[in-house]
């Protein structure tokens, strides 16, 4: 008969890793969310703005944007519409397929991203307890975990 209680159960290194990754992920998500609140945008909106910036003026459909999103559960069309209502992006019908729309980063969106860029070091400071070598090693390990 097993007399161990949940509190005394030994967990192995992989279980501890899962727990640590989950806690760290939540910490980072909360820090990002709090950081972006000052700019009145969500992490998903920030992600889409960055995807549009990386397109460098080339039009992207909402499907193109969704494929590039880290969070695939996002309702990309709704988020794009919110960015448009904030004048951070704009869209037009696709010239060769009227069922699709093309999304672009507006000048206001470019300005907001440049403003955020100047303050990103504040957000990155949560990682400064690691040395450059430790950060590099952790990056490598995390990339190794992803397929």
Image (spheres, helix red, strand yellow):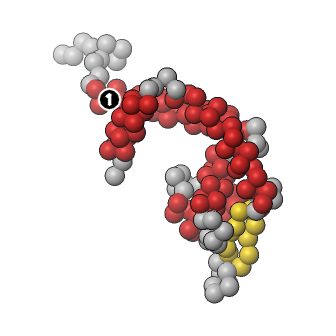
Q: How many marks?
A: 1
Which percent across, then down, holds residue 132?
44, 31
Residue drawn where x is 78% and y is 60% of the image: 107
Picture residue at 63% right of the left edge, 71% below the top: 58
Q: Residue at x 57, y 37 (%)?
A: 29
Decide: is 118 above or below 104: above
Q: Nearer the viewer, residue 18 or 124?
A: 124
* Camera sees residue 39: yes
Q: Residue 116 at what x, y percent from top left?
A: 70, 43
Residue 93, located in which quarter of the rendered image?
bottom right
In this picture, residue 70 sits left or right of residue 1: right
The residue that mark 1 highlights is 15
Quadrant of res 39: top right
Residue 18 visible to the viewer:
no
The percent position of residue 127, horizontal first and vertical second, equals 51, 29
Image location (x, y in percent) of residue 36: 69, 40
Residue 101 lies, with reference to residue 16, above or below; the image says below
Q: Is residue 26 above or below residue 43?
A: above
Crowding at dot 1, Cα within 10 Å, few <14 / some 14-19 / many 20+, comes out as few
């Amino acid at each position: 008969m097993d007399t161990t209680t949940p509190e005394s159960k030994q967990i192995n290194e992989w279980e501890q890793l899962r727990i640590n990754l989950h806690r760290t992920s939540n910490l980072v998500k909360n820090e990002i969310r709090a950081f972006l609140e000052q700019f009145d945008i969500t992490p998903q909106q920030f992600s889409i703005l960055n995807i549009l910036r990386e397109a460098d003026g080339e039009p992207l459909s909402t499907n193109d944007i969704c494929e590039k999103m880290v969070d695939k559960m996002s309702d990309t069309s709704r988020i794009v519409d919110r960015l448009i209502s904030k004048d951070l992006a704009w869209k037009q019908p696709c010239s060769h397929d009227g069922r699709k729309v093309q999304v672009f980063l507006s000048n206001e969106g470019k300005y907001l991203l440049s403003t955020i860029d100047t303050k990103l070091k504040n957000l990155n400071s949560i990682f400064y307890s690691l040395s450059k070598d430790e950060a590099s090693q952790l990056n490598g390990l995390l990339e190794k975990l992803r397929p």
